[in-house]
Each structure stands twice: as C-alpha cells, then as structure tokens.
Amino acid sequence: MVRFKIGVVPYLNAKPLIYGLEERRDEVDLFYAVPSALPKIFLDDKLDVVLMPSVNYFRSKNVYKIIPDCSISSDGSVESVKLFIRAPKVEMVKVVALDKNSLTSCVLTKIILWKRYSIKPKYVVLDDQGTVNDEGIDAFLVIGDNAMRLSEEGFHVLDLGLEWKKLVGFPFVYAVWVTRVNSRLFGVNKLLKDAKERGVKSVDRIASSESERVHFEKERCLRYLKESIKYHLGEREIKGLEAFYRCALELGEVCEGVTIGFNEW
C-alpha cells in the first residue's frame, strides 16, 4: 500500500482536517511545519500533498492541483488572523510588522489596508515577535493560536476575516490541500475528504484535547472550530479565492494567468 506523505500546519484551525488522518497512520505520514515553510518542503519533492497557503497556489503558475471539497476558510470573523494597531486611527498607520510564519495573511493584510482603508504603509517582516514593541511599528499581524491568545487591551484590532467579508462579501480561503499537476495519487481525494468529514463530526472531542494544548477553555475552542473556521470548498469559497487572486494580482503579489484547477484522483 502506498503511504501518502502529507504536509500540515500545527494550528488549532487545521485539526478537523488532520484528525481523521491521525487515525490512519497506516496510510499516511504527517509532517508538521508553519505555513511559510510548507511550500518550500513541497517544492523539494519531499511531500505528496500539502496544506498550502492560498497565496502560494497563485504564486506558481499552474503547477498545482487543488483537492476538492476541503479548505481552511472563514465567512466573517476568523479570530486567529488579526492586525493589532497602536495608532489612533487605521489611516495613520505608517509601518506594519508582518508575521514571518504567515504568507497568505501577510498579503491579506496589504489588501485590507489598501482596499478598505486606502493606505499602503511600509511593511517589515519580523523574526522575533517580541520586537513588535518597537516604537516605530504602528501595527503588527499575528496569526494562529497566538492571535487568539494575545490580549487586545490597548489596541485597535482588525479581524482580517471579518474585514475581507465586508470588502467582497465572500468567504476567505486561507489554505487548501494541493498536489502537483502531474501527480497520480489514486484515492487521495477520498482520503482527505473522508478525513475532513470525520474531523468535523469530532469537533467536540478535538476541542477537549486541544484545549489542554493551547490553554484555552474547551468552550472557546469548540466555538472557534464550529463557528469561526469553515472546512468546505464550495462555490462561494471559490469565488472568494478568485477575488483574492484578483486583489493580490493588482498588488503584484502573485503570478499572472493562474487558474483554479482540481485534482481528479
């Protein structure tokens, strides 16, 4: 039996996609890495399938195929992708610190500040999150479990999932399963869809186990997994992906001529 090598992220929001795979270790090997690292590992031909940041799909011209029916998305407030702002008004932001572990959320930040607030500040990428206390930084992006953990006191906070919904009216897709366009991984579509369905049905159990790891109350984890994060990839999510591509293309963040194509296997 072929064992699929699958790249995943270590965040709470991905657990419902991964939960069903962790129960099938006879069929898969899971490799954990932050979103910014996974595309490089994938390009080095060390993985068969990866949970890829959406922006990276559009940065490589038609070399990937998306696994149907699965995504990490939000349709409004996402809770785990936030821009913390020190300036009195968003329009006064001059310097923004981006999270080095993120890719899609960094581009989303630029789109929101440009399209909704008509500003194009200077962006810096920080290796050390502690340096966000630098007085020269007016705002900083935080993603994943840390975004939910960080106190909002003293900041004006933009939930970028909600900001996107207000901008375009469609869900935002943060990541999708992808494989290479020339791969023939028979059964991988069903494997990942079945795992997603298993995980979605098991969110109560996932919330219980993850609450101990991330040090959140179970109820908060459960609400986040059931209300803030979505796992489908339907017509509205695809329209959201297309809108993101158009905006990112205007900013020069992605390649021209990329189409959305799906794996058939």
Image (spheres, grey):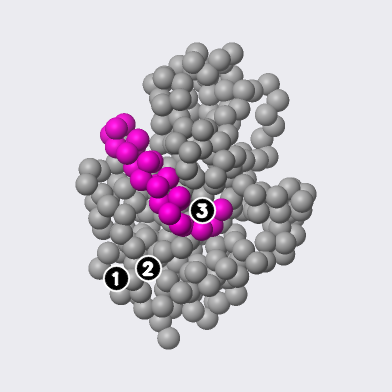
Q: Image point 34% across, 67% down: which residue?
A: 263
Q: How many marks?
A: 3
Position in image of residue 247 (x %, y %)? 35, 35
Q: Amino acid at mark 2?
A: Asp
Disc 2 and disc 3 in contact, CB within 8 angstroms: no
Position in image of residue 163 (x %, y %)? 52, 33
Q: Quadrant of residue 52?
A: bottom left
- How crowded is the residue under tag 2: few (<14 C-alpha within 10 Å), some, or many (20+)? some
Please give the label number shown on residue 72. 3
Q: Is residue 186 above or below residue 127?
A: below
Position in image of residue 228 (x %, y %)? 62, 47
* Residues shaded magenta: 230-252
Q: Amino acid at mark 1?
A: Ser
**Residue closer to the observer: 139 or 186:** 186
- For mark 1, give the secondary structure: loop
Q: Amino acid at mark 3?
A: Ile
Disc 2 and disc 1 in contact, CB within 8 angstroms: yes
Please give the label number shown on residue 48. 2
Position in image of residue 229 (x %, y %)? 59, 50
Front: mark 2 or 1: 1
**Residue closer to the observer: 106 or 118:** 118
User: Is residue 247 within the magenta segment?
Assistant: yes
What separation in Å lies between label 3 and label 1 (alpha carbons)?
A: 23 Å
Q: Is residue 33 above or below residue 99?
A: below
Q: Main secondary structure of the magenta part?
A: helix
Q: Image point 43% across, 60% down: which residue?
A: 177
- For mark 3, give the secondary structure: strand
- For mark 2, give the secondary structure: loop
Looking at the image, can residue 209 be seen? Answer: no
Please give the label number shown on residue 183. 1
Task: Judge from the rendering whether residue 211 lies leftward or rightward of residue 229; answer left or right.
Answer: right
